[in-house]
């Protein structure tokens, strides 16, 4: 049995969090995409001394993984700053938290999209001005190695706030660095549905490059509110032009929410279904209460005294009210196993790494769906085209049925 993350005696699948690489003192682990488009660790056995540090922070081997719903408080909230709210994916609370962190002398690890490298990266910000690059949810895996490594190497008294997915936050919380001085770190995760293969994003991006006649974008606004908070869209900017993803029949979001193209670990992820490891969890507050709100409302779950202290500090910058834990998680993937179709998943993973255009793959995928599901998709697409005066009442009615 190998005492590293190549050990096959796993309890769970790899999330691609990448914490195993920066905790390795001999640099025996590197992180690369596998053939299906997911981050995976590769061990150089010639460098490995089998110290086992990589396994101590690894989700795959944790026999004592904690499942807990315990929280100190739950809120529905949104940012009073209209500009910040409009740029945020939901209620703009993460932006306020990040600003408070900078004011207190924390450095902030968050997810940005690197236009030059064409990938999502978790990087460190030291000033309020640098926080702008964190706007928008990126619906594929973030490369965390460099950011985690910088934090783990820091021997100073510097404090850090780490914003990431539940699997990333869990992984950092298991490092020796965190366990020795947890008071130096604020851990903030999100309600997560899972991560699709980056091959989907690459195909989608290539489609937009052809449309805008550019191989490089000036900016990409992820999860924009061009169509309003309840609709998912991405704005692409190039050559002084803007293109917004389709409101209906958009291949990226339809395949993402179709759930047949996720990382294997995402389907039954335990990290997204526990409140044991983060100080704060944030996300969209879905449900009938805010069905008519088109600007964005965040669900905020507070786990620790440190988390509550931060929420109290930004309270005056939010419109905020108490909320119920069960109401919040009812519309999330929390505590749920995501179902998928093996045949459709195999088809998508194969075709997305080939030469076929995304629009063809997407058309073939839709034909593979059950008839009732296709009819339901068509109905939803029709409703989305209605004017707001009709759209919102019908949408609310559908949720009540």
Image: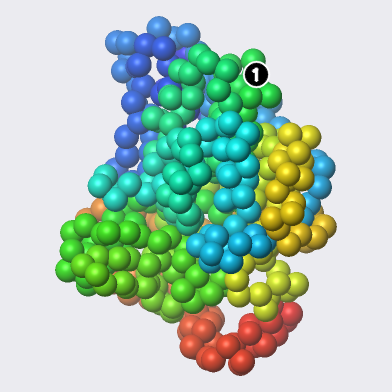
Q: Check the image and tell me how it is coloured.
A: rainbow
Up/down of 30 relative to 269, above or below: above
Q: Position of residue 107 (x, y in %)?
A: 53, 33
Quadrant of res 4 = top left
Query: How many discs appear?
Result: 1
Q: Position of residue 10 (x, y in %)?
A: 52, 28
Up/down of 103 relative to 175, above or below: below
Q: In this view of the protein, can residue 65 be seen by the observer?
A: yes
Q: Residue at x 58, y 44 (%)?
A: 99
Q: Residue at x 57, y 63 (%)?
A: 85
Q: Residues within 10 Å of mark 1 (few under 14, many from 20)?
A: few
Between residue 90 and residue 27, name the one nearer to us.
90
Question: Relative to 132, is 193 on the left or the right?
Answer: right
Question: Relative to 368, is 218 on the left or the right?
Answer: left
Q: Secondary structure at mark 1?
A: loop
Between residue 28 and residue 93, name the one nearer to us.
93
Q: Which residue is mark 1?
A: 181
Q: Position of residue 282 (x, y in %)?
A: 65, 51
Quadrant of res 39 = top left
Q: Residue at x 32, y 59 (%)?
A: 219
User: Which quarter of the rendering shows the C terminus?
Assistant: bottom right
Q: Position of residue 340 (x, y in %)?
A: 51, 58
Between residue 8 and residue 113, name the one nearer to us.
113
Q: In this view of the protein, can residue 341 be seen by the observer?
A: no
Q: Residue at x 29, y 43 (%)?
A: 35
Up/down of 168 relative to 213, above or below: above
């Amino acid at each position: 049995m190998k005492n590293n993350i190549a050990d096959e005696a796993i309890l769970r699948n790899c999330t691609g969090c990448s914490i195993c690489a920066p905790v390795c003192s001999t640099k025996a682990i590197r992180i690369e995409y596998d053939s299906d488009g997911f981050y995976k660790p590769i061990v150089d056995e010639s460098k490995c001394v089998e110290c086992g540090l990589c396994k101590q922070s690894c989700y795959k081997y944790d026999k004592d993984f904690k499942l807990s719903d315990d929280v100190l408080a739950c809120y529905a909230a949104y940012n009073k700053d209209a500009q910040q709210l409009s740029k945020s994916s939901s209620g703009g609370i993460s932006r306020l938290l990040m600003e408070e962190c900078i004011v207190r002398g924390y450095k902030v690890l968050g997810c940005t999209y690197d236009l030059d490298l064409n990938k999502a990266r978790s990087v460190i910000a030291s000033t309020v001005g640098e926080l702008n690059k964190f706007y928008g949810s990126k619906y594929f895996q973030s490369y965390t190695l460099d950011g985690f490594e910088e934090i783990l190497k820091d021997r100073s008294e510097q404090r850090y706030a780490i914003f990431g997915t539940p699997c990333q936050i869990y992984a950092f919380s298991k490092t020796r660095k965190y366990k020795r001085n947890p008071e130096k770190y604020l851990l903030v995760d999100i309600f997560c549905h899972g991560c699709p293969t980056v091959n989907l994003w690459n195909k989608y991006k290539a489609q937009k490059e052809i449309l805008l006649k550019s191989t490089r974008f000036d900016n990409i606004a992820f999860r924009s509110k061009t169509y309003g908070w309840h609709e998912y869209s991405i704005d692409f900017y190039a050559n002084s032009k803007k293109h917004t993803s389709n409101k209906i029949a958009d291949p990226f979001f339809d395949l993402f929410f179709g759930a047949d193209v996720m990382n294997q670990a995402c389907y039954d992820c335990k990290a997204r279904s526990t409140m044991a490891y983060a100080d704060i969890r944030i996300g969209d507050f879905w449900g009938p209460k805010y069905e008519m709100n088109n600007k964005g409302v965040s669900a905020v779950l507070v786990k620790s005294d440190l988390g509550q202290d931060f929420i109290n500090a930004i309270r005056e910058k939010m419109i905020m009210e108490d909320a119920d834990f069960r109401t919040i998680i009812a519309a999330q993937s929390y505590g749920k196993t995501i179902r998928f179709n093996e045949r459709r998943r195999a088809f998508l993973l194969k075709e997305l790494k080939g030469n076929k255009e995304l629009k063809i793959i997407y058309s073939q995928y839709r034909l593979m769906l059950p008839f009732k599901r296709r009819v339901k998709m068509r109905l939803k697409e029709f409703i989305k085209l209605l004017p707001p005066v009709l759209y919102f009442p019908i949408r609310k009615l559908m949720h009540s049925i």
